[in-house]
Amino acid sequence: MLRPVAMWAALLTASVASAHPVSRVDYSMRAAIQLDGEHLEAVVVMEVPFDVVAADLRAGMEAARLATDPSHQAQQVLDAYSHKVWDQMGQGLRVRVDGQVVPGSWGPKDNRLNGKGAVTGGFFLYMVEFTPSVPLKLVQDVDVVIENWGLTDKPMVYSAMVVAGHGWKVTMDSSRVALPNAPYNVDDPRFWTRNLSLRRLEARFVSAP
Amino acid sequence: MRRAALALCVACAAPTPDAPAIVADFEALHAPVYHVFDLGPDRDAVHAQLARIFADDALTDAYVEHWRALVRMRDESTAVHISGVEYEDVTVLDMDDAGRVRVDASWLVRGVVTHQRHMHPRINRYRAVYTLTPTDEGWRITDTHMRDLARVSSVLTANDVLGSGAGTGADAGFMDPLEMFNAGLFDAPKDAPSAASREADKPVPPDAPSVDAPPADAPSVVSPGANAPGDAPTVAPSPKGSP
């Protein structure tokens, strides 16, 4: 008969069968573009290996241990770190619509998983989204690009996805050059590559009333 | 997200169970089982802890299983810090004439394993059917049937990335970094505090038996072959109050 606690111990100590898409030492960067009605969503997700984050945080966390309120101090350290990562991500990102750079800003995406640790995968997750500072004209035929010039010194694997929301269909998706021409599957290693072409994700949408 | 418990007392002629109260009692009874990881292979402490949760043969089975796990962890210099137990769904299945209740429970256990100077966060999901028996000291688990167990996946789908990302069920595979801090995951690498070393640190009377040997006067409640694999530990739980 299986017993919860014994099996918990067994599962705990077993090696990780499935993990980060390619390895546990690489960062990963995934860009996503969606056009939905009159809304453009441009999101970039970065996964940072546990060991990297742990090493970055160690000094601050050790200091937090000695604080009067360790949890409060640790939370401040964590918040500062997350904002640093989001800022680093945003600094290297740019959005173009129909060839023109769109003024706006990248900031942390309001998502409950942002900044959390993906336990099975062995990484921390950081997500940023683009907020244009001007109204976008999205009519008929729209070309959207996310350019990523940031964090080039990190060992990185890439993925990307383009999604047509209400009122649009995708006629071109540059990621198809490097990724399988199949429904996107984040759990499929074929959808992760070191191909640097994915640092520039271009998608063309046409209206589909 | 945890769903509400439902009473499915279809065939029972016995008293209708007060499902919400039983669910609350079950969770309060069951969660402390994980405290045994804080005890190390201290037989009296482990037995006392389990006796607050299990009874009869289920207590013997639980003791053997936990003892084996704790000894193995000691031998492998492995330590476990449980940071949380979350019940996703607890359903009262039925109640018999004797007042025994069966509950179908699914829950998550979150924790950090320290093994050979490395720390690994883990989130596991379990499902089991338990039989709860009323005793003078409250409910006790008297039977366990494990239904399922798995590492919780932390795969992020397209729905998690785009839009609000709400309600995709991916949350379970993720852990808040503050929880990791509290579990010591960001501490400098160090050897797992072995249970043996903790045990050795305790003051021990000169005539105290070894932790691996049963006390001379302890009743052998672990029958050879009774749910115990061949390499089951030979130690038996000592009676309450014995040294």
Image (spheres, coloured by chain):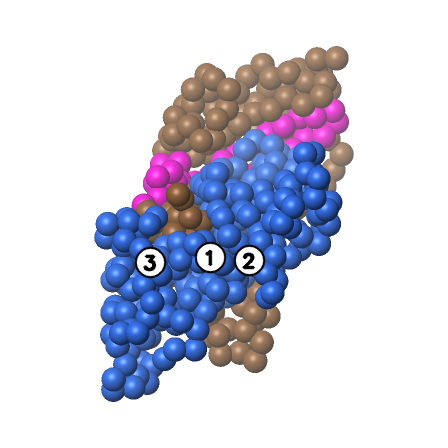
Q: What residue does disc 1 label? A: B56
| Residue type for callout 2 | Arg
**On the image, numbered disc 3 is attached to which residue?**
B222
CA gap between label 1 and label 3 equals: 11 Å
- The residue sitting at 63% across, 44% down in the picture is B96
Determine if residue A182 is in view: yes
Give percent across and percent down for residue A191: 43, 27
What element does badge 2 sit on?
strand
- Towards the viewer: A197 or A114: A114
* Residue A20 located within the stretch drawn in magenta: yes
Mark count? 3
Label 3, residues with CA under 10 Å away: few <14, some 14-19, many ≥20:
many
Camera-nearest label, 2 or 1: 1
Amino acid tagged 3: Val
Which tag, 2 or 1, sits closer to the chain's start?
1
Q: In the figure, B68 relative to B205: above or below?
A: above
Q: Nearer the viewer, residue A194 or A98?
A: A194
SS of the residue under disc 1: helix
Q: Position of residue B168 (x, y in %)?
A: 61, 36
Badge number at residue B140: 2
B94 displayed left or right of A178: right
Q: Are marks 2 and 1 in contact (CB under 8 Å)?
A: yes
**Residue A187 in which image quadrant:** top left
Q: Quadrant of the C terminus of chain B?
A: bottom left
Q: Which residues are magenta?
A: A15-44
Which colour is chain A painted? Answer: brown
User: What hue represents chain B?
Assistant: blue
At 47% from the left and 17% from the top, the residue drawn is: A182
